[in-house]
Amino acid sequence: MIVCHCTQISDHDIRAAIDWMRSADPETIITPGKIYHALGKSADCGGCMPLFLDTMRSSSKLEVPAQLANLRAGSIREENNEGRRQGYRLSQQSAAP
């Protein structure tokens, strides 16, 4: 099935590009831009993007590598003051003795 009419990219082309990228580098993050680049094409109007993304998601080799899956979650720490010093609000400064 043709996914992108502007550049004549089919669902088979997308899956083949994903397979090729995953076999070349198992830890790569696969994006639509990388797929276009691997196929030697560039996005034109963007009308195909919803179908393009659905086709990507249906590939079994699209998953994020296990080493990278929880990378961000471990580096984020919750802070109530968002890094501000204590008493940063005017109402807190005027209440101080």
Image: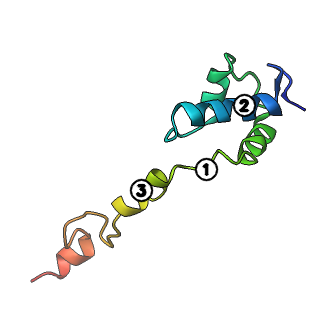
**Residue type indicated by callout 1:** Glu
Nearer-N-terminus badge (1/2): 2
Residue found 76% across the figure and 48% down from its top: 58
Q: Nearer the viewer, residue 16 or 50?
A: 16
**Residue type indicated by callout 3:** Arg
Q: Position of residue 78 (x, y in %)?
A: 35, 69
Residue found 86% across the figure and 23% down from its top: 5
Q: Is residue 52 left or right of residue 86?
A: right
Nearer-N-terminus badge (3/2): 2
In which quadrant is the C terminus drawn? bottom left
Q: On residue 16, which mark appears?
A: 2
Report how far apart the C-alphas of labels 1 and 3 lie in the structure. 16 Å
**Residue type indicated by callout 2:** Ala
Q: Where is residue 32 in the image (x, y as percent from the top left)?
A: 65, 34
Residue found 59% across the figure and 32% down from its top: 21
Q: On residue 63, which mark appears?
A: 1
Q: In this view, does 97 lie to the left or right of 9?
A: left
Tag 3 residue: 72
- Asked which quadrant contains residue 41, the reply is top right
